[in-house]
Image (cartoon, rainbow, N blue to C red):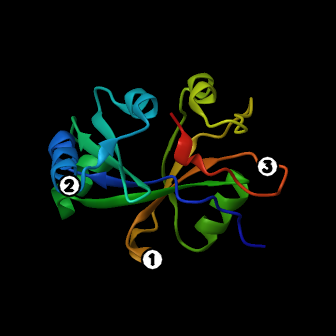
Amino acid sequence: MPSKVSPLVHIEIAVRDAEEAYQFLKRVFGAEKTQLKFAGMLDGPGAHVVHVELGGVVLQFIEPRIEGTLWSDFLKEKGPGVHNLTFTVENMDETVSALEKEGAPVLLKFPLDWSYMAEIMPPGVSIKEDQAPVHMIDTMEKVGFRLELGEATVGEDGSLPDLKDIK
């Protein structure tokens, strides 16, 4: 059975200057920064992170600050561009297993600060105590971008949450 997937969480884009990428979209389209708490949690010594809302879609600009990361290597090899699309799935283990069977291995796993994430989630979205780490999947050769997957709890209506209103 196919894995259940959420609406798009964000498009993650590796750039050399996240603020300049944002300013360009602001000048041309009036785009604004969004999800300030979420972006602030992700921002740090490894990368500068800026979330921008454009046309109802969240763009996550990642400006690597250190060498040897997936994002810095992507910039070096390909230049600025879409690094991955981010979604949530109902069952991380089953989804990862299905992806690996299709030749799409896990590149990286990373936990988030789940207690903080619980505070910034939209109403009705909960974080499980045994929340799986976020997984970066190597689907580049298959679909032209990587997949970044988080695990989410299915709602009463059987759907996965739309995280567009994350803070």
Q: Quadrant of residue 128?
A: top right
Looking at the rendered image, the disc whose residue lies closer to the viewer, 3 or 2, is 3
- The residue identified by callout 2 is 75
Note whether residue 50 is visible: yes
* C-alpha gap between disc 1 and disc 2: 19 Å
User: Which label is found at residue 142?
Assistant: 1
- The residue identified by callout 3 is 155
**Label 3: element kind:** loop
* Mark 1 closeness class: few <14, some 14–19, many ≥20 residues within 10 Å: few
Residue ID at (70%, 54%): 160
**Residue ranking furthest to the front:** 30
Q: Quadrant of residue 166?
A: top right
**Spot occupied by residue 118 in the image (x, y as percentages of width and height):** 63, 28
* Mark 2 closeness class: few <14, some 14–19, many ≥20 residues within 10 Å: some
**Label 1: element kind:** helix
* C-alpha gap between disc 3 and disc 2: 37 Å
* Dot 1 or dot 2, earlier in sequence: 2
Q: Which amino acid, by three-letter code, is at mark 2?
A: Leu
141 or 58: nearer the eye? 58
Q: Is residue 71 left or right of residue 144?
A: left
**Label 2: element kind:** helix
Residue ID at (20%, 58%): 80
Residue ID at (68%, 52%): 92
